[in-house]
Amino acid sequence: MKSIIICLLGSALSLLAQMPNTSSESLPRDLAEDVVKEVNRDQVKIAAVQTSGYDKGDERREGYDAADELIPDIGRAGEDEAQLVVFPEYILGHIKVPSSSTEKIATAAAKHSIYVIVGCWEVYNDDTFANTALVFDRDGKIMGKYNKTHAAVDHYEGTPAWSRPPSDKSREWFLKNDPEWIMNRGNDLPVFEFDFGRVGILKCYDGWFPEPFQVLSLKGAELIVWINGRGGSVEDFIMKTAMFQSHVAMVTANQAYGSGTMIGDPSKWPTRILARCPDKREAYISATIDLRRIRKIRSTSRNFQERRPELYGKAVEPMGNNGPCNS
């Protein structure tokens, strides 16, 4: 009898040894993380990167892919346990979507299970293009795009000022010197559903208008990402004003020849910048925003309840040719 029991135990142990190891280390990456990783919707860590790549008027350079320079920062953000990493405007240059550049970003996002927002010029099959922010989810899929809605044009002719592009310039001239005159402008201010919260996106000159911040907040955005590609600094006073008036957290990113890459939280008093990159150099920052408290502020906001939309019609009327004072 004793020998039978020993034999049965031996067989059982042998079968157990042949069974696959179900520890998180042996599971595929996505399944392993499903087991051990939980999304914190209350205290959300965000990363932002001030870096260099392609700029506004740059053409593609043979043998250079700016995506290669972003991969280490995505990895750093993942190791930092950030849930989102944000890069500047224009940074990937003129690309088709999808492309080898977006595949590299997608692979890194999936590897580190992190959301990524990054700027590019998205080129379409008919050679038109848009100033696009690409949104990658934790699985590396492009879950959405935002196309810049307000064109940051640099040259004009005639009156009123800034109403017409130069008439004697070629497409090649515009591509190099003033591409936003001929880009496809966006016609929507979307809010994206991330697993930790609702996110809106603006690009550079969009942020010089108060209405986009307000619209995104009223559509439910809890965090607004404002990516830039310009010299000088992203304006912290605009950021603080938007956070205070619209009850949203904010992240800004700029190219390294400029400055003002920041992370801000309106749940602190006074509304404050939690982290900021040093000026005019490549740098990485991260900070944790209190989305739980921001949601509470939004749900009890006197500002939202006391709005008077019937008084604001003038703000959305087209401006007359003679300017606001004489229209």
Image (cartoon, helix red, strand yellow):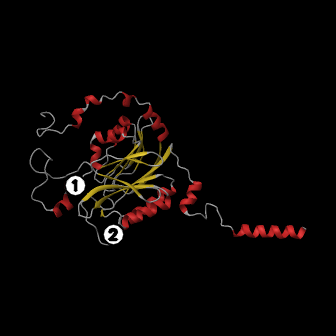
Q: Tell me if label 1 and label 2 are in contact, CB under 8 Å.
A: no
Q: Which mark is residue 180?
A: 1
CA distance separating discs 1 and 2: 23 Å
Which of disc 2 and disc 1 is earlier in sequence? 2
Percent position of residue 119, x then y? 33, 56
Residue type, numbered disc 1: Glu
Horizontal side of 184 relative to 274 (left or right) equals left
Q: Looking at the image, which residue is at 36% across and 36% down?
A: 246
The residue type indicated by label 2 comes to: Tyr
Q: Which quadrant of the figure contains the N terminus?
A: bottom right
| Residue 253 coordinates in the image, percent (x, y) | 36, 51
Residue 177 location (% of width, % of height)? 19, 59
Residue 263 placement, left or right of 315 = right
Q: Residue furthest bottom?
A: 63
Q: Which residue is mark 2?
A: 64
Instruction: Tell me the SS state at disc 2.
Output: loop
Residue 192 place in picture, x, y as percent:
39, 48
In the image, which disc is placed on residue 244? none
Q: Quadrant of residue 142?
A: bottom left
Q: Is residue 303 above or below residue 261?
A: above
Viewer-side residue, 317 vs 172:
317
- Nearer to the camera, 28 or 283: 28
Quadrant of the rendering where the C terminus is positioned: top left
221 relative to 168 in the view: left or right: right
Question: Which structural element holds mark 1?
Answer: helix
Picture quadrant of residue 105: bottom left
Q: Residues within 10 Å of mark 1 (few under 14, many from 20)?
A: many
Residue drawn at the location 27% of the way across and 41% of the way down: 209
Q: Residue at x 44, y 33 (%)?
A: 299
Front disc: 1 or 2: 1
Q: Quadrant of residue 93?
A: bottom left
Q: Residue drawn at (16%, 35%), measured in percent from left and top?
A: 324
